[in-house]
Image (spheres, rainbow, N blue to C red):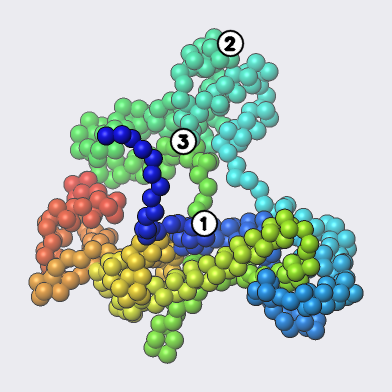
Amino acid sequence: MALELRQQLKLSQQLTMTPQLQQAIKLLQLSRLELADMVQQEMLENPCLEEKPEEPEQDGYEERVEAPAGESAENDDIYDKEVARNADWEDYLGDFASTSRQASLRESELPEDSNIFENSYSTRASLEGHLLWQLYLSPLSGKEQEIGEAIINNLGSNGYLQSSIEDVAGIAGCSAGRAESVLKKVQLFDPVGVAARTPQECLLVQMEVLHYDRDPILVSLVRDHLEDLQERRYKPIMRKFKLTQEDFREYLDIIQTLDPMPGASYGDVEPHYVEPDVYVYKHEGEFLVVLNEEGIPQLQLSSLYAGSLGAMRNGRDKEYLQEKFNSARWLIKSLHQRQRTLYKVMESIVRHQQDFFEFGPSRLKPLILKEIAEDVGMHESTISRVTTNKYAATPHGLFELKFFFNSSLALSDGNEVGSESVKILIKKYIAEEDAKAPLSDEKIVNMLKEALGVNIARRTVAKYRTALGIDSSSRRREML
């Protein structure tokens, strides 16, 4: 059979993700702070976007440009003439520049207050910078400071020395004995115990500074039995040192005042700030949903560029400006759709979790994404995106929207209870238990059955307890 080329027409349907649709989907899953940053970036890059003034200016123009491409040439000419006649460029720059005229005037009048924000803001102090600052102020020789730099540059995020003293000596070009001598001095810097190689060494340095090293029993507990203390093997230690329960408890209290990770407070992890996207208030017996619009600029199309569009003769410039107008219009529409979707989803959550908002987390009901999707007439993936990294301020605290979705456990009467409600009860029971007789998982199973009538297995209680970061009863048991 001979090979040949043919042209063939084929009709088919397919779903194409346009850039505008991708942007709308991205907006749904952005957190509130990320959304504010994105809007600010778009305002910097798109000249056709501007922020709505809080109070509309009464300048004689009440006509709002919604579709600049359809404006007549006559209106464009009139608009351009009026702008040219009445334009006060000093006022224009005061309204649209990064700093207003009022701020500029105040800056010239009060120079000492011009950088209040910059003066009050500082970067997070690092452990390395904090130690180097002390090193350069210490009465050490130039070579000892060089050795100290090698030690500080080899510290981990928790403040421990990650390299051997021989490696540090090789980096600094000195003997191991001299490097060890400088290491002892660095360990006395703030925070005390930094640059230690083991937890025992870290705690022993702190004890030396606090003069706790005068007690040989306390020194031996830290140097030789730190692992036994961690595993709560108390009885053999008490027999070895012939200690009473009261004396041993005093030693434990002293050890617990020491910091095994002195560099942890200088970690590089930045704090994660959370702002509520929605507020839920109770008013006259009903729960109201209010979106948090503070900090997110309200956008509108720039009337200045809209009036210039019709008068443009350069095709390339006109095409660029038209593209920016279309992009700005789509962004405004996408932001409105995002807020509308978030509002509808939160309203549906309030309807499904009425008992939670009324009585608290212990009354949280089972809920899945499909139920909310069917209620608001959207796809489950949309609900998943709009509840990601979103937070609601409720009468019972600040919660992520994902918190309201949880699996169900069957009750003896045929009803269901949310897994989060069971976790809250488990945490409550353990918090109120007798420390000398902690509750076992089997006991918690019986208590849950009596309180809720829930059919739950012991391994499920153990799984929930582990998820809450709570040790088993044997590890929670205090010494007898």
Q: Does dot 2 land on a helix, a strand or a loop?
A: loop
Residue most extreme to the right: 85
The reply to whether residue 337 is visible in this rendering is yes
Q: In screen coordinates, is 9 left or right of 327?
A: left
Q: Which residue is drawn at 60% across and 23% down?
A: 149
Q: In x, y percent, where is residue 152?
A: 56, 27
- Residue 173 is tagged as 2
* Foreground tag (3 vs 1): 1
Q: Which of 435 and 409 is in front in this view?
A: 409
Residue most extreme to the bottom: 284
The 10 Å Cα crowd at callout 1, few under 14, some 14 to 19, many 20 or more, is few
Q: Does dot 3 land on a helix, a strand or a loop?
A: loop
Residue 61 falls in which quadrant of the image? bottom right
Q: Does dot 1 land on a helix, a strand or a loop?
A: helix
- Residue 41 is tagged as none
Q: Nearer the viewer, residue 246 or 411?
A: 411
Looking at the figure, which quarter contains the N terminus? top left
Determine the CA span between mark 2 and mark 1: 58 Å
Q: Name the residue under label 3.
A: 158
Determine the CA span between mark 2 and mark 3: 26 Å
Q: In x, y percent, where is residue 310?
A: 75, 69
The reply to whether residue 217 is visible in this rendering is no
The 10 Å Cα crowd at callout 3, few under 14, some 14 to 19, many 20 or more, is some
The 10 Å Cα crowd at callout 2, few under 14, some 14 to 19, many 20 or more, is few
Q: Name the residue under label 1.
A: 19
Q: Which residue is drawn at 57% across and 21% down?
A: 150
Q: Which of 245 and 87 is in front in this view?
A: 87
Q: Disc 1 residue type?
A: Pro
